[in-house]
Amino acid sequence: MNRKLALGVTLLLALCSSVAFGLARRHGAWDGVLVGRGGSKIKGEIGMVGGKVAGTTEVDVKLTGDVAGSTRPWHVHVGSCQKAGPIYGDAKAYAVLRISAKGAADGKATLRFSLPDSGYYYVNIHESVANMGKIVACGDLLLED
């Protein structure tokens, strides 16, 4: 009887480990590189990971090479820089980026969605609140293993 119990416990642990590994792999991180558009010298990094609170996603953007004193709206969108799509989440979750005297900015947003494990996403940086139609930088997000 002890052998059967030991075998059962071993199988249960193996199954639990496999399930945990599968869940961990499903929810990796999304990373990307921002590239300036239309003569913009902006460059930077973007990332999207599972939030600290269950059912949320955290997005980070860091950029350099921008015009000091500018303010830049930004958003994650569904799609790609080549094939635009709607904003991912609530537009109000994305605080405007304030460009420092050195031409840099860091931004964060917390979205009320679980981190996606598939699809296509990108980040764009708009010229200003008054000119949302002009994109000054864009970067596709890629799911990392």
Image (cartoon, helix red, strand yellow):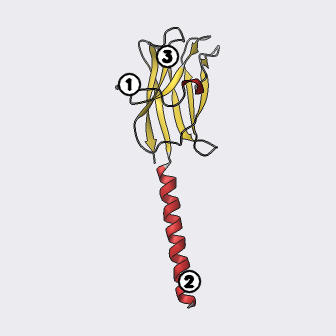
Question: For mark 3, what is the residue?
Answer: 126
Up-down relation of residue 83 to residue 70 (above or below) = below
Q: Where's residue 29, x and y in %?
A: 51, 43
Residue at 38% over, 24% down: 84
Q: What is the quadrant of residue 81 in the picture? A: top left
For the residues marked 1 and 3, what is the alpha-carbon distance in whole angstroms? 13 Å
Residue at 45% over, 16% down: 135
**Marks 1, 3: nearer the viewer:** 1
Amino acid, disc 2 = Ala
Crowd band around label 2 with a 10 angstrom C-alpha radius: few (<14), some (14–19), many (20+): few
Q: What is the quadrant of residue 51 in the picture? A: top right
Q: Where's residue 131, x and y in %?
A: 49, 9
For the residues marked 1 and 2, what is the alpha-carbon distance in whole angstroms? 55 Å
Amino acid, disc 1 = Ala
Amino acid, disc 3 = His
Q: Secondary structure at mark 1?
A: loop
Earlier residue among tags 1 and 2: 2
Q: What is the quadrant of residue 105 in the picture? A: top right
Crowd band around label 3 with a 10 angstrom C-alpha radius: few (<14), some (14–19), many (20+): many
The disc placed on residue 84 is: 1
Judge from the rendering whether residue 98 lies leftward or rightward of residue 43; answer left or right.
Answer: right
Question: For mark 2, what is the residue?
Answer: 6
Q: Where's residue 117, x and y in %?
A: 45, 45
Check whether the beta carbons of the residues at disc 1 and disc 3 lie within 8 A of each other. Answer: no
Q: Where's residue 102, x and y in %?
A: 62, 16
